[in-house]
Amino acid sequence: MNACDRTAVPLWSAVGVGLHLLSLAFAGTVAHASLAGMTDDPNIRELAEIPAVEVITRSAVMLMSAAAEKLGLSAEDPDESPHRDLDEARRLITALAGLVTASAEYLGPHAGPVRDGLKTLQLAFRESSAAASRASTKAHAKLVSGKLKM
């Protein structure tokens, strides 16, 4: 999928299943003369015309998608994902939690699904962290036992 292709339909319902961050141009939110060649499309909206709840919701979806990628959830085996980075995932999930907390009253019908997505990512992070910790403990034990045998 081309990030500048405004005709593609994003799959927002499947967070962490191979989603990629979409540029603001893809989301149809920015139209300025500095974006040469992208402003001729009549479907592009001025940022000032977009309701705050839509901007907040899109931001939440981007944070969810990025966190899911950093947790490796788009890979068949998350533990083997080349994109897995638990520290980055933690930062994104923390930012999402702050956004959800600060904007919950404004999200209306979107509040429940966004909160559910946050909870799912938090659980996935805890599971990934625990698995990484167990693997690290095993590796450390092997290293220590190897040193003791010398």
Image (cartoon, rainbow, N blue to C red):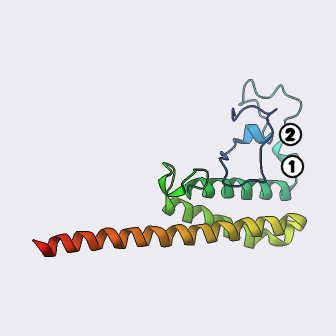
Residue labelled with disc 2: 45
Mark 1 / mark 2, whichever is N-terminal: 2
Residue in the image at 18% along x and 70% along y: 146
Q: Is residue 148 above or below residue 42?
A: below
Q: Position of residue 150 (x, y in %)?
A: 9, 71
Residue in the image at 90% along x and 65% along y: 109
**Frontmost residue, 119 versus 61:** 119
Q: 97 left or right of 69?
A: right
Quick check: can you spot residue 98?
Answer: no
Residue labelled with disc 1: 50
Callouts 1 and 2 close, C-beta under 8 Å: yes
Q: Position of residue 85 (x, y in %)?
A: 49, 57
Where, by quadrant of the figure, is residue 44 drawn? Answer: top right
Q: In this view, does 91 lie above or below 77?
A: below
Q: 13 left or right of 88?
A: right
Dot 1 amino acid type: Ile
Which quarter of the image is occupied by the N terminus? top right
Crowding near the residue tagged with mark 2, few <14, some 14–19, many ≥20 C-alpha atoms within 10 Å: some
- For the residues labelled 1 and 2, the Cα–Cα distance comes to 7 Å
